[in-house]
Image (cartoon, rainbow, N blue to C red):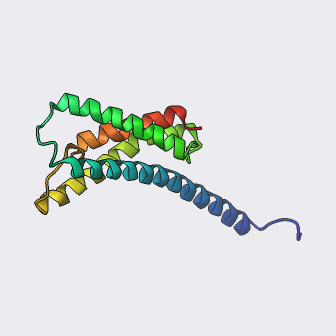
Amino acid sequence: MGSNPTSSAIVRQRGGKAMEFIFEVFLQFFGEILLQIFFELFVEFGFHSLADTVRKPRHPVLSAIGFILLGAIAGGISLWLFPTSVIKNPDFRMLNLFITPVLVGGVMMLIGKIRSKKGQNLVRLDRFGYAFVFAFSMALIRFIWAA
């Protein structure tokens, strides 16, 4: 009788494992999101510091191509710093490839709105579309080459 666990103990154990799994998945996605936000903020800071010297607006397609290349470079640098993905499940890694760029694009758009309300100059990375293509190309590089 002493070696048989009670049904309430089994339920608690299973419930604990489910919560642990949910917490682990949340932390994995959160880590990837923070990594991409860090790189986008770093690049955005660079563009804001150069905004006064580069006044001539570029064609939107050329700007998008530039952000794709910058995102790929940021993805390569992030692989050098963090060669493994915190998300181990292949299905979750695929999901991360689309969710994280949408969330990061939204964060950058909100930062752009705050800058606009303060009367600060905006750069293209302060807009959702450009932030999304930067984050997506970074996420794609990490999806392909992160272990």
- Relative side of 45 to 61, left or right: right
- Relative side of 45 to 18, left or right: left
Kindly indicate the quadrant of the structure image that contains residue 101: top left
- Residue closest to the eye, 55 or 145: 55
Q: Quadrant of the N terminus?
A: bottom right
Residue 72: percent from left, percent from top? 40, 34
- Residue closest to the eye, 18 or 102: 102
- Residue depicted at 24% across the width and 45% down the height: 125
Residue 34: percent from left, percent from top? 43, 54
- Residue depicted at 18% across the width and 58% down the height: 115
Q: Residue farthest to the bottom?
A: 2
Up/down of 34 relative to 125, above or below: below
- Relative side of 10 to 1, left or right: left
- Residue depicted at 25% across the width and 33% down the height: 64
- Residue closest to the eye, 1 or 126: 126
- Residue depicted at 40% across the width and 45% down the height: 100
- Residue closest to the eye, 44 or 102: 44
